Amino acid sequence: MVSFITISPLPPTLFSRTSLLPSVQPLRSLAPITQFKKALCWDWKVNCMSSGSSPPPPPPTPSDSTESESESETQSFSSDWSISTYTWCASIGTVGFLETAYLTYLKLTDSDAFCPIGGGSCGDVLNSDYAVVFGVPLPVIGFVAYGLVASLGLLLPGKSLPFGIGENYGRFILLASTASMAAASGYFLYILSSEFSGVSCSYCLLSAFLSFSLFFITLKDFGLQEIPKALGLQLCVASLVIFALNTSYGTSPAISSSSLAEIDLPYVTYEITTPSSPFALSLAKHLHSIGAKMYGAFWCSHCLEQKQMFGKEASKMLDYVECFPNGYKKGIQIAKACADAKLEGFPTWVINGEVFSGDQELPELARLSGFEQNESNQPS
């Protein structure tokens, strides 16, 4: 089909008569285009199409292209962040796993921990009553918790969780685990500041840092829309952890330390005033020669009475082991030598490999140690 179209007004220098154009629709617009690759001219926008055909789809506008690229970048960022979250969890969980594995080994072998800052502060905390929860050493619990987080961080990207657990449930398990670890770390930081005033524990602080980092990284992965849904889970887990620790230790973090009946005794020595008899001197020399040891505590009245039996001179000859040389307060660590002896009370005698609890009369100590009495060293 041929159409005759008269276009007016037209530039006089371009057209002087009616133009014959094959198969074109009426001219829609006249747009001056000032730059072409080859020359400068007027461009007449003419759409050519056959009768009954549909117009081609309009080309994407710059705004549509920008929005599409932005949406693609957002989806890519979201995907990358999910992978990054799991990678962080696996990495940080592995660091915590190695730390607690080392502390578990020390606990099971009854060894002293290496304290990076020097001194025995780490050992005082790690071997205190607060290092055990319901009879289970705290490093063992941390070992399992960090191992679980590290495993989830490795398995979630591949969606290869055991027992047919889906990715969504796996994410909630990860959040519950990190929330419980953060709640426990907060509780232990309170204990460290209130019950171990002036004591520093590098391992405790490192574990708290790792736990809080894991929690905030996992929480950010949920986003603002999902956080309210997970809020109930976080509160429930934190409450259960605090309740369990409270029950185990029999204390409440809500009670201020000033209201607790806390015992804090600085180390002191007491002077022995009684004179030593010849028998006491001979017995003390004999006990020292066979390696007999007396374990006691500076605050133990029976220990003081035992030394008074020997007298001032003889008591200095005894191999006496002080179990609290740095003073005594709630949660402080007993001396390693006393812990190795597995004492049940004070004083305790270890003679020829046998353990005898309580203060002993001098003739009884002579019998237990095989001390041979003669006329010169008979007790008066």
Image (spheres, rainbow, N blue to C red):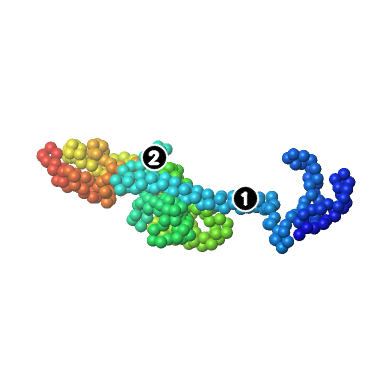
Mark 2 crowdedness (10 Å alpha carbons): few <14, some 14-19, many ≥20:
some
Quarter that holds the C terminus: top left
Q: How far across and down, in percent of the image, does residue 37 sit?
A: 73, 40
Mark 1 crowdedness (10 Å alpha carbons): few <14, some 14-19, many ≥20:
few
Please give the label number shown on residue 69: 1
Identified by mark 2, the residue type is: Cys
Query: Which residue is pictured at 45% across the width and 60% down the height?
Result: 166
Kindly state the secondary structure of the residue where label 1 is placed.
helix
Q: How many marks?
A: 2
Q: Nearer the viewer, residue 305 or 22?
A: 22
**Is residue 43 shown left or right of residue 338?**
right
**In which quarter of the view is residue 163 placed?**
bottom left
Query: Which residue is pictured at 79% across the width and 53% down the height?
Result: 21
Distance of mark 2 from mark 1, alpha carbons?
A: 53 Å
Kindly state the secondary structure of the residue where label 2 is placed.
loop
Determine whether 71 is above or below 336 in the image. below
Q: Nearer the viewer, residue 199 or 41?
A: 41
Q: Nearer the viewer, residue 158 or 146?
A: 158
Query: Which residue is pictured at 24% across the width and 50% down the height?
Result: 358
Query: Which residue is pictured at 42% across the width and 53% down the height?
Result: 155
Q: How far across and down, in percent of the image, does residue 348 sit?
A: 25, 47
The earlier-in-sequence mark between 2 and 1 is 1
The residue indicated by pointer 2 is 115
Residue 168 appears in view: yes
Identified by mark 1, the residue type is: Glu
